[in-house]
Image (cartoon, rainbow, N blue to C red):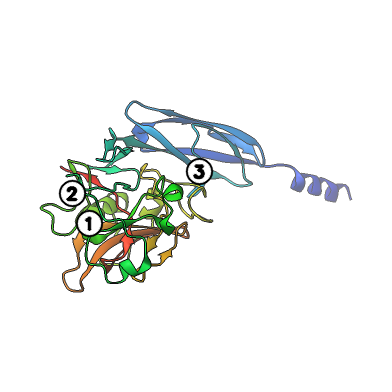
Amino acid sequence: MIIGFLFMSMSCSKESYFLTIEVNPPEAGSATGEGEYKSGEVIKLTALENAGYQFASWTAEGDYVSTELNADYKMPARDITLKASFYIPGQSVTDIDGNTYPTVIIGQQEWMAENLRVTRFNDGTPIPHLTESSDWVQLTTPAYCWYNNDEAGNKTPYGALYSWFVIEGQRKSGEKICPEGWHVPTDAEWSGLIRFLDPNSDPNELQESLIAGGKLKAVGTTHWKNPNKGATNETGFAGIPGGFRDQGGNFVQKGDLGRWWSADAHPTYGSAWWRSIEAGSARIARHHLLKRQAKSIRCIKDQ
């Protein structure tokens, strides 16, 4: 009986587990909170930014923890590794309407960190604002709209939705829709971004990468529906699910899906290439669809 009691007491006693912190990238900053803890113990995490970097998020094996430099974390009943992610902010850019966008540097590229919401080309020409579904069914010209035709509820932060025709026929890839010195990313520039985040990515696959989408997604469920799986936003790209307007003029998948045009048309099918990330996985997809659909745009800085 005494032996059994001792065994039960030892089995019920709290064990210690190890918390390890990975700083990503290592030169971006530092973090404290590593150590050995009891299950259920609340740990004070602290991240410190080095010059030229900005803190992105705390994640636990791909699951969102916090975007705060100082955060509390409840220790699970197992060893675990947390990641403190940082990114390089750019200088921001302002469009012809006066909208200012934060920017981020990812590899050798500088990207807008918000969806485009301009209503004029950068020469001052208005972009047609089409609201009726019937306007989009046979569309062959530049146009934009707001999701559900609700500018107040969607301009910030989701941005406008544009037909691909706002890009077509320009000297460079979409340089008129973007601020001066910026353009709509080509299909190759999108693939370059994804390859930087995932060397195993393959642009010949529909799912170009199984992990890069998570690195580009805004964390949490303020904009994304649950589960927003694999979101870390470790790039600062802050991709959000603005949905899109389909070829029938219907608004679909806000909260579930973020989809962005590239500047390149498909050589055969009369469609254009896009990239898409979703709430349910860390994937990013590459495909092409009709140019009259309305999708989000992110601009990239000229090099």
Please report the residue visible at 47 percent of the width from the left and 60 percent of the height from the top.
280
Q: Earlier in the sequence, mark 3 or mark 2?
A: 3
Q: Is residue 164 left or right of residue 215?
A: left
The outermost residue toward the right is 1
The outermost residue toward the top is 51
Kindly identify which residue carries mark 3: 81
Q: Earlier in the sequence, mark 2 or mark 1?
A: 1
Mark 3 touching mark 2, by CB under 8 A? no
The 10 Å Cα crowd at callout 1, few under 14, some 14 to 19, many 20 or more, is many
Q: Measure the C-alpha gap from mark 2 to mark 1.
A: 8 Å
Inspect the image, locate mark 3, and give the three-letter code of the amino acid beneath it.
Thr
Quadrant for the C terminus, please. top left
Specify the quadrant of the image occupied by residue 253.
bottom left
- Tag of residue 176: 2
Q: Earlier in the sequence, mark 1 or mark 3?
A: 3
Compared with 127, 252 (above or below) is: below
Mark 2 touching mark 1, by CB under 8 A? yes
Q: Measure the C-alpha gap from mark 1 to mark 3.
A: 45 Å
- Tag of residue 166: 1
The 10 Å Cα crowd at callout 3, few under 14, some 14 to 19, many 20 or more, is some
What x and y, as percent, mark residue 159? Answer: 37, 49
Q: Is residue 31 left or right of residue 129?
A: right
Mark 1 vs mark 3, foreground winner is 1
Please report the residue visible at 37 percent of the width from the left and 41 percent of the height from the top.
236
Q: Can residue 175 be seen at all in this image of the molecule?
A: yes
